Image (spheres, helix red, strand yellow):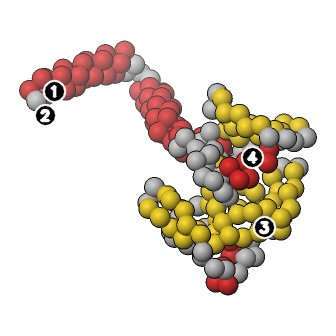
């Protein structure tokens, strides 16, 4: 703490004592009422500070997975606080969360998500390769019986299972191109068929 900070702290403490002393002298007869009002204002102040501090967490929770069905064949997705767009698709009837990745060629499932979608990953041959930010990984080509997003269901959809470690599944251009129109503007992704 610098000497300027110490001087400012002493000044603010003296000012608080002077203002507090004035309130005590002015309200000698109603000290209980003054104390009650002071506590109410203190709790309101703490509530505002807590709400401000937690606002990002509240917003992240309420915006999570908010996909808006705008009409037949049109979907709108808000950008999340981390800058990505997320969609939950029903793969073979199982809900799987994807990050939209226009830089990915295919729909790429993690081993865990592929297993949840009913694919026996151990029987697939990892004969393909993919270049990722973490280097080259092996991939296994798969066919998904059904892929449903909103009111649109596609059948016999090509995808890949990543043989390496991934944080989550990727929704690449192989699936996005089926929508015909992809638009990103104003913090919103719109898919139209």
Numbered badge on residue 144: 3
Q: Residues within 10 Å of mark 1 (few under 14, many from 20)?
A: few
Viewer-side label of 4, 1:
4
Residue where numbered disc 4 is placed: 177
Q: What secondary structure is found at the residue carrying circle 4? A: helix
Among the two numbered marks 3 and 1 on one chain, the one whose residue lies closer to the N terminus: 1
- With respect to residue 57, does 9 lie above or below? above
Quick one: quadrant of the N terminus?
top left
- With respect to residue 145, does 82 lie above or below? above
Answer left or right for 6 relative to 98.
left
Residue where numbered disc 2 is placed: 1
Is there CB contact under 8 Å for labels 2 and 1?
yes
Q: Residues within 10 Å of mark 4 (few under 14, many from 20)?
A: few
Q: Residues within 10 Å of mark 2 (few under 14, many from 20)?
A: few
Residue 146 x %, y %: 84, 64
**Distance of mark 2 from mark 1, alpha carbons?**
6 Å
* Res 40 visible: no
**Distance of mark 3 from mark 1, alpha carbons?**
65 Å
Q: What secondary structure is found at the residue carrying circle 2? A: loop
């Amino acid at each position: 703490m610098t000497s300027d900070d110490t001087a400012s702290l002493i000044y603010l403490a003296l000012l608080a004592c002077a203002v507090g002393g004035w309130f005590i002298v002015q309200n000698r007869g109603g000290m209980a009422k003054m104390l009650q009002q002071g506590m109410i204002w203190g709790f309101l102040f703490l509530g505002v500070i807590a709400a401000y501090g937690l606002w990002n967490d509240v917003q992240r929770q309420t915006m999570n997975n908010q996909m808006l069905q705008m009409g037949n064949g049109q979907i709108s997705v808000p950008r999340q606080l981390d800058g990505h767009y997320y969609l939950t698709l029903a793969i073979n009837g199982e809900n799987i969360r994807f990050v939209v990745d226009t830089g990915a060629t295919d729909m790429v499932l993690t081993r865990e998500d592929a297993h949840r979608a009913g694919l026996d990953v151990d029987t697939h041959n990892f004969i393909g390769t993919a270049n990722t930010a973490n280097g080259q990984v092996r991939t296994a080509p798969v066919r998904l019986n059904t892929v449903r997003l909103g009111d649109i269901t596609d059948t016999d959809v090509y995808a890949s299972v990543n043989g390496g470690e991934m944080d989550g599944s990727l929704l690449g251009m192989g699936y996005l191109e089926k929508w015909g129109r992809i638009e990103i503007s104003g913090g919103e992704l719109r898919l139209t068929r």
